[in-house]
């Protein structure tokens, strides 16, 4: 079984690299295969809750965004306050968070978009060369309760998740390598989109990962 899984990981790496080459994205042979254990994937319940939390904090984080007391009320109505991370609790303790504090939370629309894809509410992701539409992310989540999101989810298979996780691992390497060289990202890649997609996928495929401390090493 272990040998079969290893071969699947190698095959996935080969497919990913072929796709990136076809798109004009640089690749390196020694970037490893992505370790994939289906037993470690987050549950649909946890993914739905996390998508809701991300949206509410993003709405709070926006300039002239949702007031703090209303944000907390929505978290309570959806039974989510107990699922906040320490970092999220700290952010919500700020009455008027600085732009520096707000920035990462508004970028997390990109992460929420990945979680909606995993739940089957978004058909396809495509390459990280464009931004998600926050209003569309919000429309999916805000019009459903957490329970409805879980009930109506068409949760992706492990293979689908690992395929996309392997791709974004390699896209992110290419964008990060260009940044380290002082160059623009290749083939139209958007570095922050790569990062926040990578962040979400690395959490998604490892249920023991703490959302505040996801490793996006490349």
Image (cartoon, helix red, strand yellow):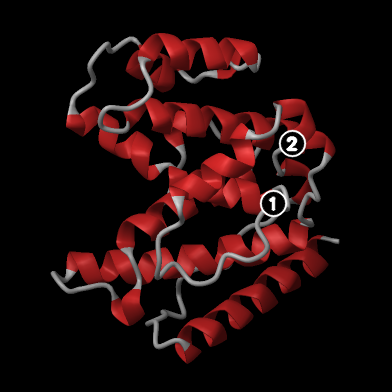
What crowding class fits label 1: few (fewer than 14 Cα within 10 Å), some (14-19), or many (20 or more)? some
Whether residues under marks 2 and 1 lie with C-beta atoms below 8 angstroms apart, the answer is yes
Q: Secondary structure at mark 2?
A: helix
Mark-to-mark CA distance, 2 and 1: 9 Å
Q: Secondary structure at mark 1?
A: loop
Q: Residue at x 68, y 31 (%)?
A: 46
Dot label at residue 73: none
Dot label at residue 121: 1
* Relative image position of residue 182 (x, y in whole percent): 13, 69
Q: Residue at x 40, y 66 (%)?
A: 130
Foreground of the two, 64 or 123: 64
Q: Residue at x 42, y 80 (%)?
A: 27
Name the N-terminal-most of marks 2 and 1: 1
Q: Quarter holding the C terminus?
A: bottom left
Q: Quarter holding the N terminus?
A: bottom right
Foreground of the two, 11 or 194: 194
17 vs 40, left or right, is: left
Q: Residue at x 45, y 44 (%)?
A: 109
Q: Which residue is mark 2?
A: 149
* Relative image position of residue 34 (x, y in whole percent): 59, 62
Foreground of the two, 28 or 210: 210
- The answer to whether residue 90 is above or below residue 50 is above
């Amino acid at each position: 079984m272990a040998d079969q899984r290893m071969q699947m990981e190698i095959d996935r790496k080969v497919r990913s690299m072929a796709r990136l080459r076809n798109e004009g994205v640089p690749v390196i042979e020694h970037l490893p295969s992505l370790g994939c254990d289906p037993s470690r994937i987050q549950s649909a319940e946890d993914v739905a809750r996390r998508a809701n939390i991300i949206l509410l904090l993003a709405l709070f984080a926006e300039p002239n965004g949702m007031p703090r007391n209303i944000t907390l009320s929505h978290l309570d109505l959806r039974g989510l306050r107990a699922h906040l991370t320490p970092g999220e609790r700290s952010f919500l303790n700020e009455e008027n968070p600085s732009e520096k504090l707000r920035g990462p939370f508004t970028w997390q629309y990109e992460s929420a978009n990945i979680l909606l894809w995993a739940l089957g509410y978004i058909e396809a992701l495509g390459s990280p060369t464009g931004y998600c539409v926050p209003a569309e992310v919000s429309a999916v989540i805000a019009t459903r309760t957490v329970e409805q999101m879980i009930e109506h989810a068409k949760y992706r298979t492990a293979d689908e998740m690992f395929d996309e996780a392997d791709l974004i691992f390699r896209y992110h390497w290419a964008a990060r390598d260009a940044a380290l060289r002082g160059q623009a990202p290749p083939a139209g890649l958007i570095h922050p989109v790569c990062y926040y997609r990578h962040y979400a996928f690395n959490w998604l495929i490892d249920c023991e990962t703490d959302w505040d401390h996801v490793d996006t090493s490349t």
